[in-house]
Image: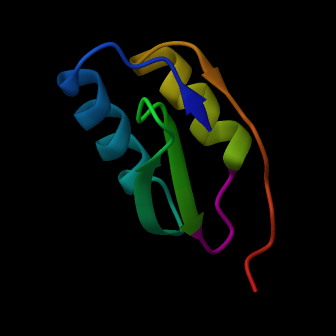
Amino acid sequence: MKVQMHCQKCRSRALKLAAQADGVNFVGLEGEEKDRIVVIGDAVDAAKLATSLRKKVGYTELLSVEEAT
């Protein structure tokens, strides 16, 4: 997910929200500007997580959803 994060406080809030979602096993930052959140887990509702991040942090774009092998 690409999340609009302007400061370290926004990054912390976004990571905390993602980590609290049901089924999440791993959360990390990616990208040159650390503007992408990688979420790995079982039965994670990506749409619900993106909506939550939009409400609490800012603009969130769902880039891809894949089944981890």
Whole-percent x, y for residue 63 in the image: 75, 38
Q: Residue at x 41, y 36 (%)?
A: 34
**At 20% from the left edge and 26% from the top edge, which residue is drawn?**
8
Quadrant for the N terminus in the image: top right
Q: Is residue 23 above or below residue 57?
A: below
Q: Is residue 7 magenta?
A: no
Residue lying furthest left: 9
Figure quadrant of residue 7: top left
Decide whether residue 42 is among the magenta residues: yes
- Could you tell me residue 9's position as x and y percent? 18, 24
Left or right of 38? Residue 66 is right
Query: What stretch of residues is rendered in magenta?
Result: 41-45
**Residue most toward the bottom?**
69
Q: Residue, x 51% and y 40% (percent of image)?
A: 31
Q: Is residue 60 left or right of residue 64?
A: left
Q: Position of residue 68 (x, y in %)?
A: 73, 77
Quarter occupied by the C terminus? bottom right
Residue 30 position within the rendered picture, expressed as x and y whole percent measured from the top left? 48, 47
Q: Does 67 sit above or below residue 50? A: below
